Each structure stands twice: as C-alpha cells, then as structure tokens.
Amino acid sequence: MFFSFAINTGVLITAKISVQSAADAAAYAGAATQARQLNAISYLNYDMRRQFKKFVYRYAYLGNVASSQFPNDPTGASAGHYGYPKIFHPDEIEGHKMTIPFKVPVVCIPITGTAHKSDNCVKLNLPSTVAQTKSFFPNGGLTAITQAFLQSAADISRMQGLQCGKTSAANLFVLVQWLMRGDITDAAFSQTLDQMTSTGNLSDQNKADLKKTIQHLVDGLGLYPRNIITMMRILTLEKLLNATAKKDIQKDTVDSFEADKTNAEMNERTIQAFKSALSNLNNEVISHDSVIMQELQTDHQITLNEIKPSFNAYVQYMNNQDLTDGTTICNAQIIAFKAKKAPAGVVKTPGTPVHYAVKIKATAKLLFLPIKDGIELEAFASAKPFGSRIGPANLSESDFVENIRPSKLGNEEVNDCSDASVSCNVPNLKITNSDTFYSPGYLVALSKIGTTVNSDGSETFTFPGGMANSIAPQPYEVGHYNILPRPASVSDMAYEFIPYSKDQNSKIYRFYAPIFTGAGNPTQKITDFMDEVFGTTSVSGQTNGNFNGVDMLALKSTIQGQIIAYVNGPLMSGKGSENEETTTFAAIELPMVPATTVSPSPQKYWLTESKEVLSSWAPLFTRTSSGVGFKPRFGYSVKFVAMQDLLQAGMNESDSDEGNVSH
C-alpha cells in the first residue's frame, strides 16, 4: 500500500503539472492567435492611412505640380500653407490680371501631362483676343481685312476653347479615378473614361489622347475601393477576435472544425489552443479523449469604430461662354467635389483589453488506484496580447481633414461651406508636429525627388520617387501606429528581424487577413459602402444627381460593379490584383523608404531607418548582435496574466510596458 501510495502520488503530481502546462499552452496559443489578428489589424489600419496619404499627395502635389509657379512661388504662402495661387482676369477689355492665393489645392492636369510645367492650370481665364481687337475699331468701321483678321482670332479662340474642354475632362476624370478607381485593368479604366466623358464633345481621338496622357497618373485602385477592401479585412478580423467563447471542447469538436474550411478559419483560436493543450499531455497517462476545454474569456473582446472623414476635393472645370461677345475665354470654374465617408482607418473603443482564458479538465490514469475511470484533474490559465497598438487611441475624422475656406474669385464664392456634412474641410494630414502636406517646405522637398533638369532648363518629373516618399513613415506617426520596418539582415535587426520573404529586398509583405470568410457577404458589404458614399456624393445630394454632366447613379453602378468584380475575380485568383493579394491574404507594400531615395539627406519628413519606427515593448535585457541590451521592436507579444486579475482586480487598458518604448 505504501509503495502504491508513493507511485500514485508521484504520477498524480506529474499529471497535475502536465494538465497545468496544457492549460498554460492553450492560453498562450489562444492569445498568440489574438496577437497575430491584432497585428494584422494594425498593419491594415496603417495601410489605410498610407492610402489616404497617397490620395492627399496626388491631390495636393500631382494635381498642381505642372503649374509654372509650383511649389516655389511665395504668392499667398504662409508659414504653414502654400497658397495655391491662381491668375484671374477681371471681366474688362484692358485685360488686367490679379494673382489670387486660392489657399487650397485644385486638381488641374494639362492635356500635355504633368511632366512639363506650364501656365495652363494657373490661369482661370484668358482675355478674348476678338473682344480686344473689336474695341480698337469704331462701330461699322471694320474692313474686309480686319474682318478676316477677327475671324482668324475667333478661330484661334475656338481652338483654345476645345483645348480647355479637353483639359476639363482630364481634370474631373483624374480626380474621380484617384478617389473611385475600382479595378486596375485597362478595360475598367476605359469603361470609366467613357462614362465620365460621355456627355462631353470629345471625339474618339480626343479620348485616346486623354487616356495616353493620364493613365500613368491613376495607377492602382482609388482611395475608396482600396480602403473599402482593407476595411472589409479589418471587420472580418474583428469578428474573429470576438468569436463566442466555446464550451466543452473535445477532440471530436476540433476535428469537426478542421473538416470544414470556414469553420476552421472562424475557430482558429480554439483549434490552436486545444491542440497546444494536447501536445503537453502524455496520452498514456492522460487520455486525449478525456480532455475537455472551456474558453472563459468574455465573448466581446474588441470594438472598432470606423473613421470615415468627408471633405471637398476641388477641381478646375472650364465653362466657356460666348467666344465672340465675351471679354474672356477659357473661363474656368473651380468646383468642390464632395467626397463623403471616405474610409481612412479604425480606432479601438476603450475597455477591457483583449485576453484569453481557459479551463482544462482531464482524467489521469493511476496504476494502482482501484478507480476504473481515473482521477479528474483541472487547471486554469490566462494570457493576453500586449506591447503594441492598432493605431492612435484618440483617432478621429478631424485628423484627416483641415477646415480651409477657399478665396473668392472676383465676387464669386467658390464654396460657401453650407453643407454641414463636409463644411470647408479639405483632405490634409500632419507630417510633423508643425508640418502638413500643404506646407511649402514639404512640397519643395517632394519636388526635389525624382526631378530631372533638362538641357533647355525645363524640368521633367518621375512620379514613383515622390509617391514612395509621400506614403513613407513620418515623424508624427511613430509611437501611434504599428509600422512594419524594412527587411534587413540579422546583424542589422537582431531581435526584431523578420524574413518577409526569401528575397531580402522584397517590398511586399503578405499575411493572413481574409475578407468576410464565414462572416458575411462581401458583395452586400460593398453595396452598403457604396450606398453610403454615393447616397450623398453629388451636387444635389442625391444618388441620381449629376456633377457637371456626370450621372452619379451611372458612375456608382460602374464603380460598384468594378469593385465586386475585383473582389470576386482577381482577389479570388490572386491574378491581376494589386501585389497579387487574394481574398484570404492581404499583400501590402512595406512602408519604409531606403535612405538612397531621399534627397537631400538627412530629411526631417521621411524616416529611413528601421530603428526609427520600432514602437513596441521589449525586455530590458535583450540579446543583440553586440551583446545584451535594450532594443524596442514592433507588433504584439503575449504574456500570462493572473486569473485573479481577470476575476477581481481587472486589467488596465494600456500596459505600463509601452512606456518603456524609446521613440
């Protein structure tokens, strides 16, 4: 009996330790799944900001860069804002002109493209040569020669008017593509071009010229489609994090989950936890068939609020009047295109942090115990992701816009800001604590990237350089977003090294972030998004309104169809999608820009070193390539938490560990 007691006591203690280890492993595995899902949300959230930055770069820079005065002319500029000047000819024969600081960007794309500077987009109108010439002759004193001269001047004015009309089509088309382009195929591009120019007077040759001119300006998905797709991924991950706590999980339960793809994805946390528990149990001592796991965490782990700012995007649009009686020609209107509810990111509602807890119950077999079924043992464990963030804790729509009232043109109010839903908001973002995308210094710095000075003194722009820098990490973002660094060698990034791919120079990072897998109908979600956008994005405020001849209902149908086709086609197959993303895996460009692309160096606007963006906690004594020391990292880690904290004291919303991060 003593021998049996000793043996059984030893076995029982070992079994108890094993069950506790199984519970610990389950809690850690479940929290690790949550950590990965939070990391995915954080990467996607930052990418949504980067896509918004991409649009603001296009709107504030590319839409104005062809101006001969941009970005160095000080007219109307202030310490914080470039003035975006316009030349306006008053309605009088003398043709006096005035330079007006308009204060906000206005999209204008010369028909020759933006690679060469010109005055075409600075001038809002031109003096009419016909009207000026007539004023020099008394009534009835025109000879046949002067009449022929006037006819020639009128012909020239008409040609100028046609050129103005083509520029108008380019301006509006480019802006709508930057906002709404729903597919990256050439066919979809042509379809939208046809829809946008169907009410104009452009010939097929005009459209072909227009397409050739602007196609390189509108590569990739527009702001709305790109961020709608990303938001769908985030909402799916939120649903996975909030999966209902499962009860009475056994081996057969997990096997049934794994037998169905949808169930496997929706229950990944539970599967990983249970399998980790089994891996710590010796089936000879503790039968795997006897193991029962209860998930103890709250059903609702996280609440994400969508950030969807509304703003005015101004576009220069020609409105030619009578070319023979009018005193000016190529008269331009500046029109506020109201872009409403643009997806820009998410913010987490304060509350109990994401956590995971389990109870494991199993039966231990004792050699000399006269109990046939053995002794039932149980253990508890809890863990949570920690040490990072999905984005700023106080993010709001005001972080993506600035309220700027544009100047009057003559006596005409361009935007009276009477629409309360958009007010005088324009898209803008902070770069540093004092600089934004409208700051003269930043615009000048952008203009020096990828610019070639030709032999004749003219400048030619290559856009990828400026684009890459415009969406790179900036000082204002560090410590607020979880930013992926560039891949680097182990010696450069010892603790935080991640091999993104076999190619050390890869610019693409792929990770699991499904689109509504088992969580809803993507087609319906796209429809809901577009109804919200186009229900108000028009001059009349109605879906069936029009914007300068553009049928908004037809445009909505076109864009919505393209996004649905993109999700159900290229995304499903991964062929023809951006960065070869799929419905299951997101594929984003790594945000860091190599120092070699920044000129002059160093630059205060762009961060080029991985160590500048690492924004998560790391142990005080971390092994590094040069010994042991403190090094921050990025992304969520996992740590155990006491059950007492969950049941009695509770857990703090933010970890004190994050205060150790050096930025």
Image (spheres, rainbow, N blue to C red):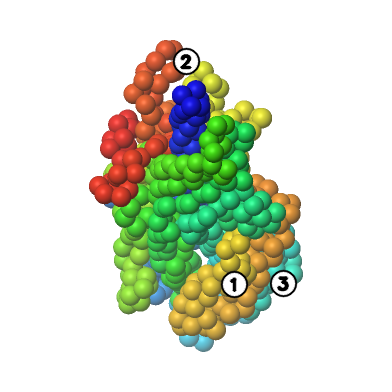
Which numbered dot is residue 20?
none
Residue 290: x and y in percent read 58, 46
What separation in Å lies between label 2 and label 1 (alpha carbons)?
51 Å
From the image, tell me which residue sits under label 2: 625
From the image, tell me which residue sits under label 1: 524
N-terminal label among 3 and 1 = 3
N-terminal label among 2 and 1 = 1
Please, what secondary structure does the residue beneath circle 1 have?
helix
Please, what secondary structure does the residue beneath circle 3 have?
loop
Front of the two marks 3 and 2: 2
Residue 18: x and y in percent read 50, 33
Residue sitting at x 34%, y 23%: 620
Q: Amino acid at mark 3?
A: Ser
From the image, tell me which residue sits under label 3: 203
Left or right for 26, reference 413: right
Q: Are marks 3 and 2 in contact (CB under 8 Å)?
A: no
Left or right for 54, reference 101: right
Please, what secondary structure does the residue beneath circle 2 have?
loop
Task: Answer few, some or many: residues within 10 Å of disc 3's Cα (few below 14, many 20 plus, some between 14 and 19).
Answer: few
Q: Amino acid at mark 1?
A: Gln
- Front-most of residues 90 and 131: 90
